[in-house]
Amino acid sequence: MPYNIAMISDFFFPQPGGVESHIYQLSTKLIDRGHKVIVVTHAYQGRTGVHYLTNGLKVYHVPFLVIYRESTMPTVFSFFPIFRNIIIREKIEIVHGHASLSSFCHEAILHARTMGLRTVFTDHSLFGFADAGSILTNKLLKFTLSDVDHVICVSHTCKENTVLRASLDPLMVSVIPNAVVAENFQPLAYTPRSQEPDHNAVKSMSRRLGPGDTITIVVISRLFYNKGTDLLIAAIPRILASHPNVRFIIAGSGPKAIDLEQMLERRVLQDRVELLGPVRHEEVRNVMTRGHIYLHPSLTEAFGTVIVEAASCGLYVVCTQVGGIPEVLPRHMTTFAKPEEDDLVQATGRAIAALRSGKVRTERFHDQVKMMYSWTDVARRTERVYDGITGAISEDEFYGHHPGSTWSATRGRAGVQSYALIDRLKRYYGCGVWAGKLFCLCAIIDFLFFLLLEVWAPRANIDIARNWPRKPFINDKNKPVGNGVYWRRAYNDRMDRRNGSIR
């Protein structure tokens, strides 16, 4: 069954990043499978209004005040009129929010539930439980996810973290990893397996690095504390001192960039460390193929798409053993280190020695990554989540049979959350002694605001947007069913039976 879906997040192109790439790739693959997808984000550098991207993906850039790291200022209610207008114009059925730190995401899920829409949330990050920022973020997440239909996490570690932070039933959380477009991250001398002459020829193509050959270590990351920039700054001089024929290429920007530059000037390492500054996502492959090792010193990471891209480019990966990183790549592609300076230096030394000895066969990495990760598979699994929350498949089929399992009286059955205001208030009230009452107040005000908007800006006065021609809907057997015109008419008939109401 095709759906009309709105992806909501503060983080989207032209800003580069893992969340941004995830939303774009997932949206285009869902469009390929016959669904209608739009993206709602804030304005970027003068990019305001409606824009069309490849594959007919429509993006709404809403002009809102950005306060920190591309996150908009939380206003709770001021986004509602614009959001409601977009939802009605595009006849949206499912609202899919992304990222715990996105104000747009949290507000959109609240407003969508008030309007009677199905909601999904995807968590891309890991957070702690002790510091003030994490406590506030976790309380906000608990508020939002108390009334969401389903949650998606990008790794099993991320799932455990989200379940604990938001006090969720684990059955309400699915794990769907990120992916990579392997064709966009090919090694320089890549030869498709079907064109390889024989095994001996392939073996001869991989030349062992000698003691005098230069090994280039690539780092592509936002230069923030949580990305391990301080750890990188401390490790670089020690790595270069121990290995004379090693050089670094570092791409990225952030508040820690000045610390990195000062270290290079103080140690006089400018001739061995090349700083590229920020690079566009389409330029990442060209940077990676200049290296032999990819170094990822992150202190916290839910998945780490960049290390998959690095392995696809034929780089041996050295990364910290934190978060969901150990789940991403097999052992023969990576060398793990503790998030400590000494261990990171030692792990990098082991990786350099492994490359020089020829123990690591990086020429096979690309084909292996291509088999492991596919955005088409991610879209298919996400589509199954949509089927589960809309009732297109049975609850037993979606969640599996769990003898003796019971659902909370306040949450209802997972994935079949009630739209009734009284049921929503019961779920919010259980979020805390004082927070629960505040959340209930927000939900009541949001509902009253919605009724006011229904009178002040009637649905009949909102023009319905014309749809981009739909592709044939692809079923679970990857076979097209019907055509775009058929599904568009079927959807219009379904909406007519609702008397023109989204609810």
Image (cartoon, helix red, strand yellow):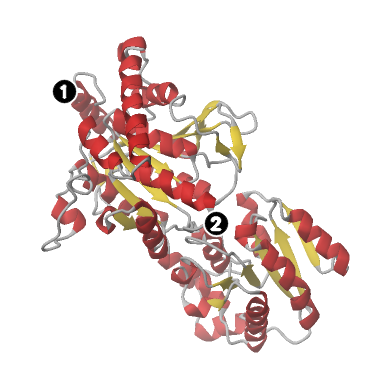
Is 386 above or below relative to 112? below
Q: Secondary structure at mark 1?
A: helix
Of the pair 394 and 490, the residue shown nearer to us: 394
* Front position in the image: 226 or 47: 226
Q: Residues within 10 Å of mark 2 (few under 14, many from 20)?
A: some
Q: Nearer the viewer, residue 386 or 320?
A: 320
> Gap between marks 1 and 2, in whole Å?
45 Å
| Quadrant including the C terminus | top left
In the image, 335: left or right of 117? Answer: right
Estimate the x, y position of residue 175 in percent, counting from the top left: 35, 59
The answer to whether residue 165 is seen in the rendering is yes
The one nearer the camera, 341 or 208, is: 341
- Which amino acid, mark 1? Arg
What residue is disc 2 on? 184
Task: Answer whether residue 466 is visible to the viewer in this image.
Answer: no
Residue labelled with disc 1: 497
First in sequence: mark 1 or mark 2?
2
The image shows a total of numbered marks equal to 2
x and y percentages locating residue 186 in the rendered image: 57, 63
**Residue positioned 30% across, 33% down in the render:** 113
Q: Would residue 363 appear left or right of 151 to someone viewing this image? A: right
From what the image shows, is residue 70 above or below residue 292? Answer: above
Mark 1 crowdedness (10 Å alpha carbons): few <14, some 14-19, many ≥20 = few
SS for tag 2? Answer: helix
On the rendered image, what quadrant is the N terminus found in? top left
